[in-house]
Amino acid sequence: MGAPALSTRTPLAPSFVEELRGIFGNRLHLGEAMRAQHGGSETHFATALPDAVVFAHSTEEVVALVKACTSANVPIVPFGAGTSVEGNTTPVRGGVSVDLSEMDKILTINPDDFDCTVQAGVRREELNSALRDKGLFFPIDPGANATIGGMASTRASGTNAVRYGTMREAILSLRVVTPDGRDIRTARRARKSAAGYDLTRLMIGSEGTLGIITEVTLRLHGIPEQISSAVCSFATMAGAVDTVVQAIQLGIPLARVEILDDVQMKAVNQYSKLDYPELTTLFFEFHGSEHAVKEQIATVGDLARDNGGGEFRWSNLAEERARLWKARHQAFYAATAMRKGAIGWPTDVCVPIGRLAACINETKRDLEKASFPAPILGHVGDGNFHVIFVIDPNSSAEHKEAEALNERLVQRALDMDGTCTGEHGIGLGKQDWLVRELGEDGVALMRTIKSALDPKNLFNPGKIFAD
C-alpha cells in the first residue's frame, strides 16, 4: 500500500503531448516525481500515477485541455490541494491531472451583497485573510487549507457547519467546464432562484466526474462582534454528546462544537504540547454580541456540569482561540504520530443527532478491541464524526482489521438512517456503501446522469461508482 504504481498503459501519443505543450508550455510535466505528487494520498490508498500533469491558469485553458483530451480519449482528473481522504483525486485510469492550484485569484468581493467570486485554486485561509479588512469571513472550515474548488467538488463541511452549513449552502454559483468542452455558469448571484434544474447543486459533490469547476461564487458572513472558545472534558462519551444535543434542543446557536475522545486528546496533547485532561472533550466556539455570547457560555456551562463535565475553560483571546483550533485541525497528524511509521485511514459517517450518542458509544466499544489506535473526533453538532485507524502500512492484517471495523461503523450508521459519508465524499473508498445507502436504482440514476454528460467516461473515471 502507498508505493508508486508506475503506469503500464499505452504512452500518450507524441502529437497529443505536443498539443498539451502548445496550451501549457512549461506548465506541462511528464516527470515521475511530479506525477507521483498528483497520484498519491495522505491516507491508505495506493498511489496511481497520471500520465501527465498540467497547471491551468484560466478557464479557457481548461476548455482547450478538455477538447484535446476528448478528441484523444484521454482521462482528465482535477486536482486542487490534494487534501481529500477517499482517493478522490487519484488517477486510477491514468490520463492528465489538471492542477488548478495556480488559478488563485479572488475575482470580486461584494461587501453589500455578502458574496464573492474566486477562482477554483484559492485556498480558504487566503480568502479569509483578504476578507478580514472588509468585516467579512467565509465560514466553511474542513480543517485542511483546501482549495475552494476542491471543497465544492467534495461538498466539504467542517467545524462551523452546525451554524453556517456546508458547501452546499455556501455556494451561489459555479463556472464549470463540461465534458464536451462547454464553459457554463450554473446560476447568477441572486440568493434564490426557481430557474430550471439546479445545476449548481448537481455539480457540488460530483468530485470532478461531471465537470471541472473553475470559478465559485460564495455566500459570506459578517465577522461576529464577539468570538469566544471553550473547552470542557467529560467523564463519559454520553455526557459530552448529551450536552451538545441539549444545547441544540434549547436553540443555542453554537458556531462550532467538536468532540475528541480520550485517545485523540492524548495524541493532541503530545503533538501540540497541550495539557488538557485525556478524557472525552468538547471544543466550543460561540459567535454573537458580547451579551449573547456570555449567555450562551453560561447556559452551555450549566448543561456540561449537569452531564458530568469538568472545568469549563473559556477565552475570547484571539491567540488562545487560534492555538486551540490549530490543535484540532492537526488532529489527523497527531493521530498518525502515535505510531512511528504509521499511516492514517480516516473514515466518517453522519447520523441523525438523536442517534449520535448511541452510534459513537457502540463504535467506541468496537474500537477498544482494536490492535491499533483508532481515535474518534468529529463535528458533533450535526451528527458527523470521524474515526482514524492508525495502521502499519505494511501490515495486511491491520488493513483487513481496519476494513472490518470500518464496515461495522458504516453499517451501524446506515441502520440508524444515517449516511456513509458526511463530508469526505465517495471517491474510491465508499462506492459499495453508496449502493447500500441509496439502493441500486438510486445509483443507476446517478450513472444515467454521468453517462449523459460524460459519454466517454473521461472525467475522473472510477470515482463515486466503479466503471
Image (spheres, helix red, strand yellow):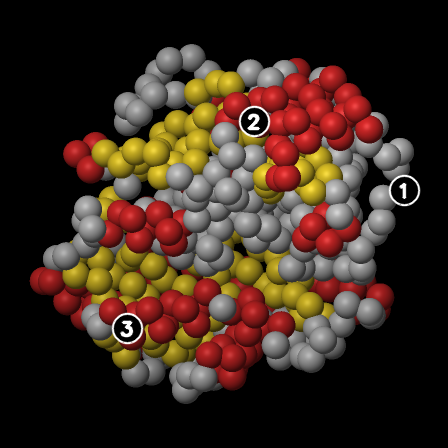
Which one is in front, 118 or 408? Answer: 118
Q: Quadrant of the C terminus?
A: top right
- The Cα atoms of the two marked residues, 3 and 2, are separated by 42 Å
Callout 2 amino acid: Glu
Callout 1 amino acid: Thr
**Residue 382 image point, x, y percent:** 42, 52
**Residue 149 image point, x, y percent:** 49, 39
- The dot on residue 61 is 2
Provide the residue designation for mark 1. 8
Mark 3 vs 1, N-terminal side: 1
Q: What element carries label 1?
A: loop
Q: Is residue 170 left or right of residue 97?
A: left
Q: Residue most toward the left?
A: 291
Q: Which image quadrant for residue 66?
A: top right
Q: Is mark 3 on a helix, strand or loop?
A: helix
Q: Quadrant of the N terminus?
A: bottom right
Provide the residue designation for mark 3. 319
Residue at left offset 76%, top offset 25%? 16
Whether 287 is drawn above or below 265: the answer is above
Q: Residue most toward the top?
A: 196
